[in-house]
Image (cartoon, grey):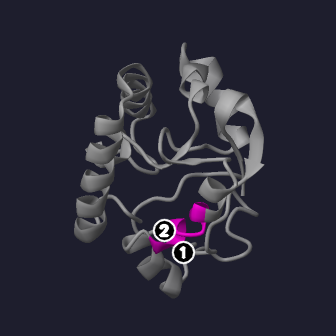
Amino acid sequence: QDRMGLDGRSFRMWKFRTMRTDAETATGPVFARPGDPRVTPVGRVLRRLSLDELPQLWNVLRGEMSLVGPRPERAPFIEEFRRRLPGYMLRHTVKAGMTGWAQVHGLRGDSSLEDRLRYDLEYVDRWSLTLDVEILARTAVQVLVGRNAY
């Protein structure tokens, strides 16, 4: 999928396909939700274990993403978010990450955009190697618990 990262630049983010190929034909871009009928049976397992995110390691190796940072969004959502939320684009002053401060606080997918932005901006302000290590450790726990992965 095309996503927006550092300085608002677009990049192709790699993921395993977990939804039907026609998943957004009728609706256009929408967030996944609990029990989403568009998710395939294998996709449900990949999402539950967050394995659909593993191909993003290629983006990290290419320098397009970091292990930790605000999660990158798709362009159709960004236009809406920047109109609705002052300061939204400040999250693009750091590389997008495979996991982030908002995610380890349970904010994934179709969760409160305001809360996610608050945590993303807090991450930008507080960035440190120690914080990144804490986020990676908490991510490991989240993957095992599988909370909000759908």
The image quarter containing residue 24 is bottom right
- Secondary structure at numbered mark 2: loop
Residue depicted at 42% across the width and 68% down the height = 50
Q: Magenta residues: mostly which secondary structure?
A: helix
Q: Which stretch did the figure color magenta?
A: 51-57
Q: Which mark is residue 81?
A: none
Q: Which mark is residue 39?
A: 1
**Which residue is the site of mark 2?**
36
Assess whether mark 2 and mark 1 are in contact (beta carbons under 8 angstroms): yes
Between residue 91 and residue 77, name the one nearer to us: 91
Cα–Cα span, label 1 and label 2: 6 Å
- Secondary structure at numbered mark 1: loop
The image quarter containing residue 92 is top right
The image quarter containing residue 15 is bottom right
Q: Amino acid at mark 1?
A: Val
Position of 134 with respect to 79 (left or right) is: left
Magenta span has 56?
yes
